[in-house]
Image (cartoon, rainbow, N blue to C red):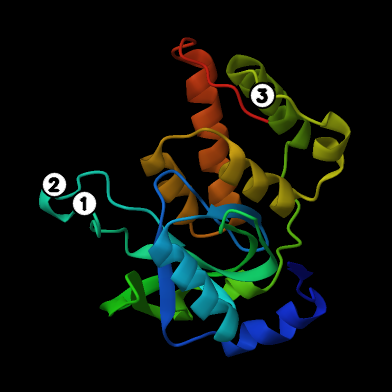
Amino acid sequence: MSSDLSRNETDAETQNLPSTLPIFPLTGVLLLPRGQLPLNIFEPRYLAMTEDALGRGRCIGMVQPKEAGNERNRENPPVYETGCAGRIVSFSETGDGRYLITLLGVTRFRISEELGLRRGYRRAVPDYAPYAADRTASRRHLPERDGRLDTIRSYFSLRRIEADWSSIEDAPDEALVNSLAMLCPFEPSEKQALLECAGLTERNDLLMSLMKMAVHGEGGGASRAH
């Protein structure tokens, strides 16, 4: 079974964000507003989370576990306080019991309180107020685009990342910066720093700094990405 959920509903529904949010901790995975994140759901508690989310507004909060986790709490490690809420915009079931979903990023949030488990998955009370601006796409044009593209080319060459350069060159600044922040193989702490940037300008500056440090630093251990 598969379904595509109406994208036209999304803008209206961002004004009615849930007061309780299931949270999905994944190390090194970043979701940003208006970014799309495909997920392969197979663990029983996250299958339950997806089923419940589909019946309760279709929202899931993506968060990262803190790197210095407690070994006695591997199942539910401490997480960073800031995450991003996404709405399920596509959903399908596989023959072996998995769910394939795509989240569309809506807004960041801070965890005000973590609640008890439900069907094995974690839940939190989100505070969306600090990130009200996330719900409106940025139309800002960042300076020095040619220089940024040169930095991206150098970084992609180092990491052996294949790219559709015509799409990259034509992409609006917000879409380009957020997509690169989500997709590039940065360290989890760097991903979290990109998430917590105040706005597009700050995220772009950090993104360029991370790429330049990689290019001018160690060249070994490059990972393959698409």
Q: Earlier in the sequence, mark 2 or mark 3?
A: 2
Distance between the alpha carbons at the discs numbered 2 and 3: 34 Å
Q: Is residue 25 above or below residue 166?
A: below
Q: How many marks?
A: 3
Foreground residue among 182 and 59 = 59
Q: Give the image location of residue 59, x and y in percent.
A: 55, 75
Side of 73 relative to 100 (left or right) = left
Amino acid type, mark 1: Arg
Q: Is residue 132 above or below residue 95?
A: below
Q: Give the image location of residue 100, x and y in percent.
A: 63, 57
Q: Is residue 175 above or below residue 44?
A: above
Which secondary structure, mark 1?
A: loop
Amino acid type, mark 2: Glu
Q: Give the image location of residue 183, x and y in percent.
A: 60, 40
* Quadrant that contains the C terminus: top right
In this view, the mark in front (2 or 3): 2
Distance between the alpha carbons at the discs numbered 2 and 1: 6 Å
Label 1 packing within 10 angstroms: few (<14), some (14-19), many (20+): few
| Tag of residue 161 | 3
Foreground residue among 143 and 129 = 129
Which secondary structure, mark 2?
A: helix
Which secondary structure, mark 3?
A: loop
Amino acid type, mark 3: Ile
